[in-house]
Amino acid sequence: MSIAPVPKMEARGLRIGFYNERIKRQLNVLDGIDLSVAEGELVCIVGPSGCGKSTFLGAIDGLTRINGGQVLIDGKVVTKPGPDRAMVFQHDSLFPWRTVLQNVVYGIELQGRVGKAEMRERGMDLIDLVGLKGFEDHFPHELSGGMRQRVNIARALAPDPELLLLDEPFAALDAQTREFMQVELLKILSRAKKTALFITHQIDEAIFLSNRVAVFSARPARVKEIVAIDLPKERTLALKHQQNFRDLQEHIWRLIEEESARTGLVTAG
Ligand SMILES: Nc1ncnc2c1ncn2[C@@H]1O[C@H](COP(=O)(O)OP(=O)(O)O)[C@@H](O)[C@H]1O
Ligand SMILES: [Mg+2]
């Protein structure tokens, strides 16, 4: 008899609401989210705008107070942020006065556990990993949006987290850079052997990147459906033109539209 491995991340019946003191009203945002992510998996989350996707990532990160249920990492209940998790947001939060290398090693520097030489070596390895070799002494304003997001990802990877939480990281990039970054992210994650949860409002991005796509319902969110993405492990942009890719797109689009219609929202986001 084989024993199922413990998921890297598991949310069990997660409930979150925000109480507004001023209007004395509770806003229920997550209404019992069940989702597990296996080690090495990339799961995308899509759902109507404002349904609670970012709130969900915040809870996994350990920053957002939970009203019910649990988040477990490697089977252990999360109570606060930790170095095993790292967040990447839409807008890079790089320090403009620090070089690429100084930005990348920031998290390691804060931990204060490694010496200067080792820190530099790890920083340079990460810069190489995200394809920015030669740019280590540049400042953020000397880089393109795509390059800045690579620095942002390298910085998140620096303390060697096991779970990357990405909240619409490519939303501010132009369409071409975005597709390029999707391919690059898959390379980076497979080289770095990381598990990831990725929020996006672009359905094609979700399908292209994922092993599975979790579709959230309108707020208060539940997992409406988990769509298995049965595409070759080796992802190339040409897949986006195949019929099975389009069928998945159509299926997920319908699920989100159903939810958006329930709340009177017209567009998925
Ligand atoms: N800290 C907070 N305090 C009060 N309300 C919040 C807070 N964070 C999020 N919300 C509310 O929770 C809902 C879901 O927000 P969010 O998780 O950002 O949605 P999504 O990322 O799916 O667009 C929104 O109605 C938002 O206004
Ligand atoms: Mg959000």
Image (cartoon, helix red, strand yellow):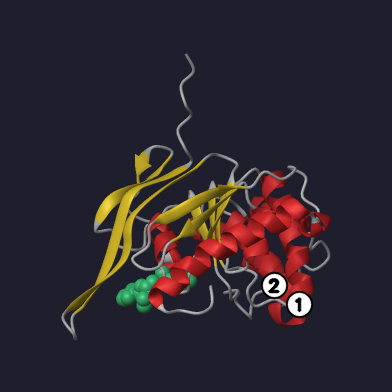
Tell me the amino acid under the disc marked 1. Leu
- Going by the picture, which residue comes out furthest to the left? 24
Residue 34, image x, y percentages: 38, 48
Q: Using a 10 Å C-alpha cutoff, classify the residue at mark 1 as few (fewer than 14 neighbours), some (14 to 19) or many (20 or more).
A: some
Q: Nearer the viewer, residue 139 or 262?
A: 262
Query: According to the image, label 1 marks what residue?
Result: 143
Q: Element at badge 2? A: helix
Q: Using a 10 Å C-alpha cutoff, classify the residue at mark 2 as few (fewer than 14 neighbours), some (14 to 19) or many (20 or more).
A: many
Query: According to the image, label 2 marks what residue?
Result: 148
Q: Nearer the viewer, residue 254 or 25?
A: 254
Q: Residue at x 48, y 29 (%)?
A: 5
Q: Residue at x 42, y 57 (%)?
A: 61
Mark 1 or mark 2, earlier in chain:
1
**Could one spot residue 224 in this view of the protein?**
yes
- Going by the picture, which residue comes out furthest to the bottom? 22
Q: Element at badge 1? A: loop
Q: Are marks 1 and 2 in contact (CB under 8 Å)?
A: yes
